[in-house]
Amino acid sequence: GEDVEQSLFLSVREGDSSVINCTYTDSSSTYLYWYKQEPGAGLQLLTYIFSNMDMKQDQRLTVLLNKKDKHLSLRIADTQTGDSAIYFCAESKNNNDMRFGAGTRLTVKP
Amino acid sequence: GAVVSQHPSWVICKSGTSVKIECRSLDFQATTMFWYRQFPKQSLMLMATSNEGSKATYEQGVEKDKFLINHASLTLSTLTVTSAHPEDSSFYICSAREVYEQFFGPGTRLTVL
């Protein structure tokens, strides 16, 4: 089946930038998402990007999409301890059938 | 953004009992809701797609007789885990679709003793 892959762990120092990477295999993906999950909680949509876009910026968050390489990244500028969480990459064709990566656990050290 | 609630947030039950989990879209109508299951330190696995007024569509490998889904209104979908067993213990998350976005509930942690 189609896969979404992410590295499992990322550790950064407070104030640094974090870059979380994701690759996917389905070239017909239309929507690509980044979700944040804090311990014991559901998923919070951080941002999403359409496949016809290369970049989207929202305050401290920057999403880059390389459609040719099927590579998505999330950059968090000036990472804070409150950003510590699990970040899920997801893709779908039609906002129905979403496929999630395994999640990247971001740890921010003071 | 839109808000999706789940009730209960956690439940502990004995093996063999049935548990119902509710998913509500609080400030929008959702013709489509989704039920996911998340194992510890793993990603979300889509269990089924719930459409208002019709039968749910289950993913391969998900037992429809064990995980009963009802989507009786545009703001409520329920998942009933029938005759629960310890292997059903998990974090169950619902989501509701509004246009381009899926909004997720906070999840329900089910522990079956």
Image (cartoon, helix red, strand yellow):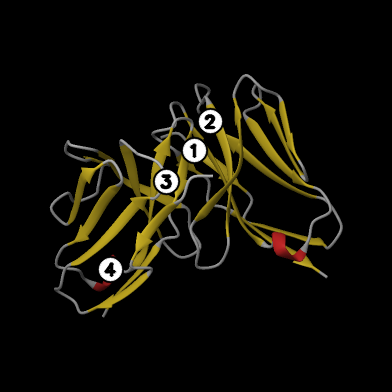
The chain containing the residue under callout 1 comes to A
Rendered residue at 66%/26% (across/down): A69
- Decide: marks 2, 1 in contact (CB < 8 A)? yes
Please tell me if label 1 and label 4 are on a single chain.
no
Front position among marks 2 and 3: 3
Q: Is residue A59 left or right of residue B31?
A: right
Q: Which residue is mark 4?
A: B87
Q: Are marks 1 and 4 in contact (CB under 8 Å)?
A: no
Mark 4 — on which chain does it sit? B
**Badge 2 density bin: few <14, some 14–19, many ≥20, Cα 10 Å:** some
Query: What type is the residue that disc 2 sits on?
Result: Thr
Q: Callout 3: residue from which chain?
A: B
Residue B92 in sight? no
Query: Which residue is under mark 1?
Result: A3
Quarter occupied by the N terminus of chain B? top right
Residue labelled with disc 3: B27
Residue situated furthest right in the rendering? A15
Please tell me whether mark 4 sits on a helix, a strand or a loop.
helix
Q: Is residue B91 above or below residue A2?
A: below
SS under mark 1: loop
CA–CA distance between discs 2 and 1?
6 Å
For the residues labelled 2 and 3, the Cα–Cα distance comes to: 35 Å
